[in-house]
Image (cartoon, rainbow, N blue to C red):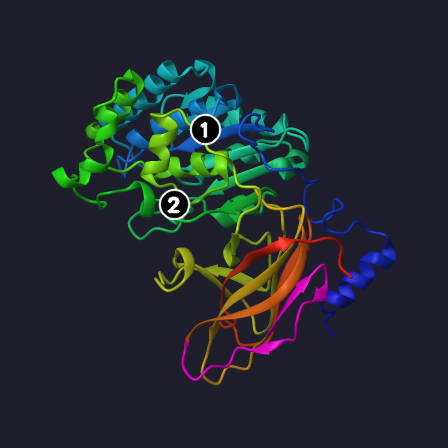
Amino acid sequence: MKAGPVAVWALVALLGLPLPGQGGLDAPLGPCPFDGKDFRGRIAWSGDGNFNDEDDWAASPVALAILARCGVAGKLVHFNYNSILARTDPNWEREHERSVLGAAERFGFRRAVFHDCRKDLAGALSGIARAIDESSAENPLYFILAGPMDVPYRGIAKSDPAKRRFVYCISHSRWNDGYARNYKHTANKRQVISQGVHWVQIVDQNRYLSTSPYGRPARADEWKAWRWMRDSTDPGLRFLWDRMRASKRSDCSDAGMAWFLMTGDQETEIAKLRRLLEGRDTPRPVAAREQVRIEAESFQALDGYEAEDRNDRRASHRLNVRLSSAGAGRIRTCFDEPYVAAAAVYDVDVRYFGEAGGRCELALFVNGARRGPAWPAAAAKQTWLTRTAPDVRIRRGDEITVEVRGGARGGGRLDYVQLNFKGRGGEEK
């Protein structure tokens, strides 16, 4: 008979093994990275810009400007670009390099931390590994992934496995994550997560920092929201405008990840960006995020589960996980995200796929203890549904598990677990 989460938890305790939050599933934990003045840790970046989409020609320099305006330029220890390896356009390589190195010079970054993957891939991979190997609980690495996973995966593979638990990979794009219809990636987010890093998936930033669609040049009216860069007396901001115009796209969406890292805010509105870049008004980071969504495919361990890309637009990031074999499965992860309270009370949403005649039974666990009753995944028709467990106390470092029993192979689909902040809380009673 297969042991469930509670039985496994009891065995772990009996053997004296470490529990999550005590050095078990994942890393020692620390406070939020930025308090508006001091940044705790270091920053790395990986971006493409040499094929598929010119948006990085604007996103890379805008991201560098965000970091510089927040006073953390010295915290950038690695930046690689032109990271699409299988295909490239030499003209695009040159344009993106103008953006990156031009911003580095104008905004005060060290030239030595920048690596063009098309010219010095070995240096880029070594740079990633070196940044990881210098990481610790007191000096974590926040690795922003603004391009496909191929280069980050290879760089992480060269690093000390014991140091990877101090690395937080941040992404917002399913294309970058290795799930694309028009390009064959050689690595994806699941392969990166399996290397032992933390994964932080934020809202797709195109909804905030792109005013024209992919696939065509921006029209005149789609540039209006950005003209403050053109009209600025600051030559650095005029440079950002020039690089965006060079791309012919009014889009710097990847820069939203730099904004999130400095603020904990996923809604990177253009007006907020303007206040920082033009007004030099450093935003106040959030004390605790109101919502923390952990995509099912981002959980650290998929036991009896696998990622599924059905390109389902009803699913978050159009991805989900499904049972890889009949019977039972579970997904589990250590809750350790930027800008969350050390301990808090949450209403916890589990989004799952209800199936007509479905026999699955689902349950939510925190540190092996079930939170609320189990529930069936049956529904009148096939659709995504949400089950909420109210008033759940969760500490940073706790292990969150969703378990499914009685499912058929390919069933038991899960979309995400979302923690909705209600207030700071102490220990479980």
Q: Which residue is mark 1?
A: 282
Q: Is residue 117 visible in this depiction of the protein?
A: no
Kindly give the residue lying farthest to the left in the view shown. Answer: 220
- Please give the name of the residue rendered at 59% of the width and 51% of the height, measured from the top-left corner: 300
Instruction: Name the amino acid type tagged 1.
Output: Thr
Which label is found at residue 185? 2
| Residue 364 position by quadrant | bottom right
Q: Is residue 406 magenta?
A: no
In the figure, is residue 254 to the left or right of 3?
left
Q: CA distance from mark 1 to mark 2?
A: 37 Å
Q: Earlier in the sequence, mark 1 or mark 2?
A: 2
SS for dot 1: loop
Residue 99 is situated, as x and y percent measured from the top left of the image, at 30, 23
Q: Nearer the viewer, residue 195 or 108?
A: 108
> Which quadrant does the C terminus fall into?
bottom right
For residue 11, side relative to residue 199 (left or right):
right
Asked if the magenta segment contains residue 363, the reply would be yes
> The N terminus is located in which quarter?
bottom right
Q: Amino acid at mark 2?
A: His
Q: Quadrant of residue 130?
A: top right
Front-most of residues 262 and 353: 262
Residue at 63% x, 36% y: name it. Answer: 166
Q: Decide if residue 104 is on the left or right side of residue 157.
A: left
Q: Position of residue 97 (x, y in %)?
A: 31, 22
Q: Which residues are magenta?
A: 362-382
Front position in the image: 86 or 247:
247
